[in-house]
Amino acid sequence: MDVADDLRVQPGVVLPADELVERFSRSSGPGGQSVNTTDSRVELRFDLAGSMSLPPAAKSRLLDRLGPRLVDGAIVVVASEHRSQYRNRAAARGRLADLLRDALAPAPPPRRPTRPHRGAREGRLADKRRRADIKRRRGVVHPDD
């Protein structure tokens, strides 16, 4: 994956490179003295609300699911774990693709409620009777004189 290419999220959903905005800044972490001089931290921004490349159904689903994460209608992803800017750019693009792919995935089927089977109910009642019997025997000791 080249960092200058369009970002393929899934079949039918491709983000053009001109809709992705990258900003670079100084990164903290590994890198020694070069950290102080190179702009290796990458902030990747995709304007989801203003995008014209997404199918309408996908766009509405993404806006609905990613609503709390949006900043002025855009998704912002940051990567600064690598020393090189190129690797951080690739990491940010991968993170954005994963985020969008997860948000586009269909919801899992609803859970069908189940009931405990007869053996489970009978076992629970038997345990309850056993426990009650133990507690009943703990009472006052009656002399057998």
Image (spheres, grey):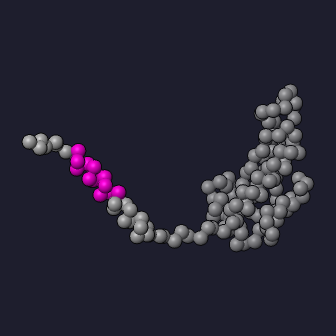
Picture coordinates of residue 50, whole percent (x, y): 74, 63
Q: Residue furthest top?
A: 33
In the rendered view, would you say 20 is above or below 12? above
Q: Residue at x 81, y 36 (%)?
A: 26
Question: In this rendering, is residue 117 above or below 102?
Answer: below
Q: Return the x and y of residue 144 as percentages of the image width and height.
A: 11, 44
Q: Is residue 9 visible?
A: yes
Q: How many marks?
A: 0
Rendered residue at 66%/69% (across/down): 106
Can you give x and y, in whole percent of width and height, for residue 76 in the image? Answer: 73, 51
Give yes or no for residue 130 being in the magenta stretch: yes
Tell me which corner region of the image, top left, top right, bottom left or bottom right, holds residue 56.
bottom right
Q: Which region of the structure is painted magenta?
A: 127-138
Magenta segment, principal secondary structure?
Answer: helix
Q: Residue at x 70, y 72 (%)?
A: 57
Residue 82 placement (x, y as % from top left): 82, 40
Nearer-the-camera pick, 53 or 110: 110
Residue name at image x 84 percent, y 60 percent = 7
